[in-house]
Amino acid sequence: MDIIGIGYMGFETADIEAWREYGPQVMGFGIGRSPQSDPDSLYFRIDDRRHRFAFHPGKIDRIAYIGWEAVGRMAFEDALKKFTAAGVEFTRGDAELCEKRGVRELIRFRDPVGYQHELFYAQKWTPRSFQPGRPHGGFLADERGAGHVVLITPEYTPELEHFLLEVMGFHWYGAGAGKGRTGFFRSKLNTHTSHDIAYGHGPGRMGVQHVGIVVNSIRDVGETYDIVRKRELPMMMTLGQHCQDPHVSFYHFNPSGFAFETIAEIEPWQGDPYELNPEVLSVWGHEMVGPILGPSVRTPEEVLDPEYLVSKR
C-alpha cells in the first residue's frame, strides 16, 4: 500500500480542559477549528493540515483511532482491493465522519489486536496557516506524517505481523533494544525514520506507551524540556540520544497518561541496509526516571470498545 505515514491520531480523554491548556502552552500545538458536528472535541495542529491530533471527551483516557494517509485516491482504491482480497473487514466513512477528519474519503478497520485504524486520502490544508500555541520553531510533519506511536499488545502473534507486513505493506525495521517481544514497522513511503508504529508485548495489557513528535530544532526540544521541568510534569526518560535513530529526545507524561517523545534530528538517519540489533537503547542520556508504562496502559476490557468486545465473544 502506498501509505505516507500516520496522518492523524484521535484520543478519548476524561479531562479535555487539561489538554486545552497543556497542548498549546507545553507542546506548542496550535488549536484548530472544531467541526460543527463535533464542537466538544479539541483539535490540535502542528503544521498546515487542518489537524493532526484530536481529543474527544470520554470516560477514560485511551486511543480512539489511528489515521493512515494514502498518497492519493488511486492508492486508496488499490488498498480497498487489497483489504477485500485479504478478507479484512472495513467500513466506509460517511460524509459526516469525513468532514470531522477533514478528508475526501476514509475507511475504518481494526488490527488483530483490536486497535481502531483508518485509511484516508486528501486531508484539508491551508498553506502558511499554522500558528504555534507558544513561541516555537515548528514541527516536522508535512510529507512524513504526524509522528510515530508505540502500542502495547496483550499478545504478540504471527497474525499481527502478517497484517502489518503482508496486508498493510509495512517495512519491518527490527525489534529495537528494548526488553521483551517488540516489533518496529514503517509505512511503504517513509524514508525518514525507523518506524511509524511499534507494538510491545505486555501480557494482559493494552494502550499507548508513547507518541513521538519531531520538532524543527534542538532548541525546540530544549525549551519544551525546560517547560516540563519548570511545571514539574512527570517524566519517563531524561534528555538523551538513541542508538537506532541518531536524534536527541526526551519523554514526559501528558494529561492522558501516555508519554510524548519530543525529538530533534541532529544527524541524518542512517537507514537500515541490514537489520540492526542495538546493544543499548541510547548512546547517552535517557535516564529512566519514571515508569515505562503510564496509566494510559490498562486491561483490554478497559481500552477496547464494549461493542467490539461483545462481537468477539
Image: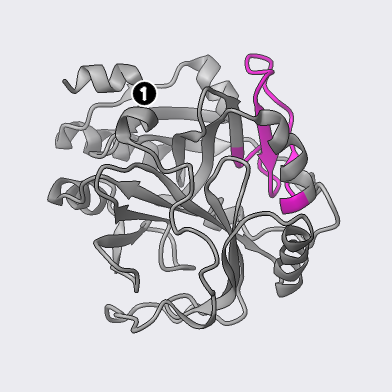
| Local secondary structure at mark 1 | loop
Vertical side of 294 occupied by 235: above or below: below
Quadrant of the rendered structure where residue 44 is?
A: top right
Image quarter of the C terminus? top left
Q: Which residue is disc 1 drawn over? A: 305
Residue type, mark 1 in image? Asp
Q: Position of residue 81 (x, y in %)?
A: 24, 34
Asked whether, in this view, residue 152 is left or right of residue 82, the answer is right
Most prominent secondary structure in the magenta stretch? loop
Q: Give the residue drawn at x 23%, y 27%.
A: 89
Left-right relation of 204 to 58: left
Give, as a single range, the part of the protein colored magenta.
26-53
Report the side of 71 relative to 170 (left or right). Answer: right
Q: Is residue 50 magenta?
A: yes
Queried whether the magenta region covers residue 141, the answer comes back as no
Quick check: can you spot residue 1? no
Expressed as whole percent of the image width and height from the top left, the position of residue 191 reads 45, 67
